Amino acid sequence: MSIVYILFIGVAILSFVAQQSLKNKFAKYSQEPLDLPLTGRDVAAKMLHDNGVNNVQVTSVNGQLTDHYNPANGTVNLSDVVFSVNSVASAAVAAHECGHALQHARGYAPLKLRSQLVPVVSFASTWVTWVLLAGIMLIEIFPVVMWVGIGLFAMTTLFSFVTLPVEVDASRRAVAWLESAGITQGEKTQHAKDALHAAAYTYVVAALSSLATLVYYILILMGRSRD
């Protein structure tokens, strides 16, 4: 078990570093204006238009780093500090979320798989904590409950890993379009890419954390089974 604990500590440290890196780079590139007078909303609207996606609306949402694409109602939702701000960071984030809209419009397979997993993961997330708790309490007399809990948690882990190519591809689309459209050039393109890489690292760490937790529960069950 000591190896698992070391893994947990390592993942926790990586998670902290990734989150701090994201916050620091977003703050840094939020102070770097674009050469064009475009806000995050303008960038998003232009990217959607340039790619022939005309059925998606760009809206604002409260909070920071709350930006997301909602395929259910066809909206790119940008946080206040992205929606109305002219900066490399806001352009990168807006283009990234539009990258998801393009994935949806083009039928990008990993996004379709992630969307199909959403109701399953929603169900699993609702019950997994209670099932695992019951499984640990009943592990000596009814270990199948623990296996059910592990199965539910495995679905959330799978979702985390399916998310990785979706996020990486959205960033790739964003950076390519920003440069081809002349929104960013040279150093500013590299800064936009750097900001999106920092965001991607948080998803990698989240997936590793979920995998480590899954392994931990499996080892608990296997350890009890050997007793």
Image: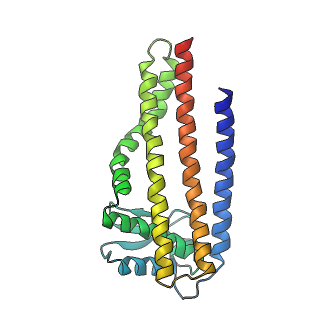
Quick one: 70 or 202, which is closer to the camera?
A: 202
Q: In the shown orientation, is residue 43 left or right of residue 106?
A: right
Q: How is the image coloured?
A: rainbow
Please identify the quarter of the rendering in which residue 199 is found: bottom right
- How many labels were placed on the picture? 0
Quadrant in which the C terminus is drawn: top right
Please tell me whether residue 211 is drawn above or below residue 26 in the rendered image. above
Question: How far across and how far down the image is residue 58, in percent?
Answer: 41, 73
Q: Residue at x 38, y 67 (%)?
A: 101
Q: Residue at x 44, y 15 (%)?
A: 142
Q: In the shown orientation, is residue 135 left or right of residue 17?
A: left
Please tell me whether residue 36 is drawn above or below residue 90 in the rendered image. below
Q: In the shown orientation, is residue 206 left or right of residue 177?
A: right
Q: Residue at x 58, y 84 (%)?
A: 34
Quadrant in which the N terminus is drawn: top right
Question: How far across and how far down the image is residue 23, in percent?
Answer: 65, 63
Quick one: 176 or 216, which is closer to the camera?
A: 176
* Res. 20 in view: yes
Quick one: 101 or 135, which is closer to the camera?
A: 101
Question: How far across and how far down the image is residue 163, in percent?
Answer: 45, 52
Quick one: 208 or 82, which is closer to the camera?
A: 208
Please tell me whether residue 139 is drawn above or below residue 2 in the rendered image. above
* Res. 77 in view: no
Question: How far across and how far down the image is residue 140, in percent?
Answer: 50, 13
